[in-house]
């Protein structure tokens, strides 16, 4: 007998914009700061971007999944965020791989700060655009709507909401 490939999960964690889905409940549990970074070797070989408009003149390492990639977002006061679609010859679907490629000097990257914090502290990556406010990507817990929320899900979501922000700031 072949096992079913259908998986059933009690809880999922998603980042970014959520599409409206009937029967799904979502709770924001954290916000991750998105930053532009590059390695010192890349910055030695290229001009350091001073403002958002400079990003287009640089190589970028792009997060892409299924041949689609989301723009880099930058807050713009009370207006919708500024969207930048940088030129990227390298497109990866793994944030750790993007951080590795940026550390290797392959271009600019737009990544969650928590992921590159140790690299910044070690000096292998530098934060760019210091005057630019960072975009905050929402992290949500999602679960199926039920008449009664199981205690294990409520406890897990509460624990994530209390703990996760400490790790990703």
Image (cartoon, rainbow, N blue to C red):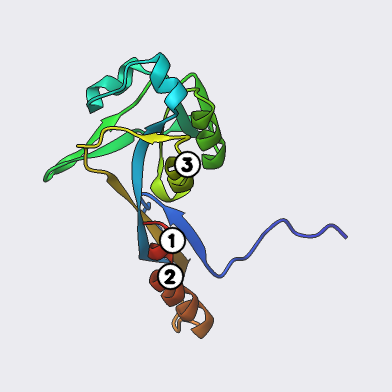
Residue occupying the point 50% across, 22% down: 106
Question: Left of 8 or right of it: where is 44?
Answer: left
In percent of width and height, residue 24 lies at 43, 65
Q: Nearer the viewer, residue 152 or 76?
A: 76
Can residue 169 be spotted in the picture?
yes
- Vertical placement of residue 35 versus 21, above or below: above
Question: Which residue is the extreme one toward the left?
Answer: 78
Can residue 22 be spotted in the picture?
no
Q: Which residue is mark 3?
A: 122
- Vertical placement of residue 4 versus 88, above or below: below
The numbered dot on residue 163 is 2
Residue occupying the point 43% across, 70% down: 163
Question: Which residue is the extreme one toward the right?
Answer: 1
Question: Marks 2 and 3, how far apart in space?
Answer: 25 Å
In percent of width and height, residue 131 lies at 19, 37
Q: Which residue is mark 1?
A: 167
Circle 1 residues within 10 Å: few <14, some 14–19, many ≥20 = few
- Vertical placement of residue 8 versus 95, above or below: below
Secondary structure state at the residue bearing disc 3 = helix
Secondary structure state at the residue bearing disc 1 = helix
């Amino acid at each position: 007998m072949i096992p079913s490939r259908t998986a059933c999960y009690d809880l999922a964690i998603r980042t970014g914009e959520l599409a409206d889905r009937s029967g799904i409940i979502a709770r924001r549990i954290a916000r991750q700061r998105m930053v532009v970074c590059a390695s010192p070797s890349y910055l030695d070989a290229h001009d350091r971007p001073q403002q958002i408009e400079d990003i287009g003149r640089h190589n970028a390492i792009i997060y892409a999944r299924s041949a689609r990639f989301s723009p880099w977002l930058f807050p713009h006061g009370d207006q919708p965020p500024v969207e930048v679609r940088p030129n990227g010859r390298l497109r990866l679907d793994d944030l750790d791989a993007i951080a590795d490629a940026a550390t290797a000097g392959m271009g600019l990257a737009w990544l969650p700060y928590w992921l590159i914090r140790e690299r910044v502290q070690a000096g292998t990556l530098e934060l760019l655009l210091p005057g630019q406010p960072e975009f905050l990507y929402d992290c949500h817990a999602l679960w199926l709507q039920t008449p009664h929320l199981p205690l294990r899900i409520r406890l897990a979501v509460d624990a994530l909401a209390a703990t996760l922000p400490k790790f990703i700031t």
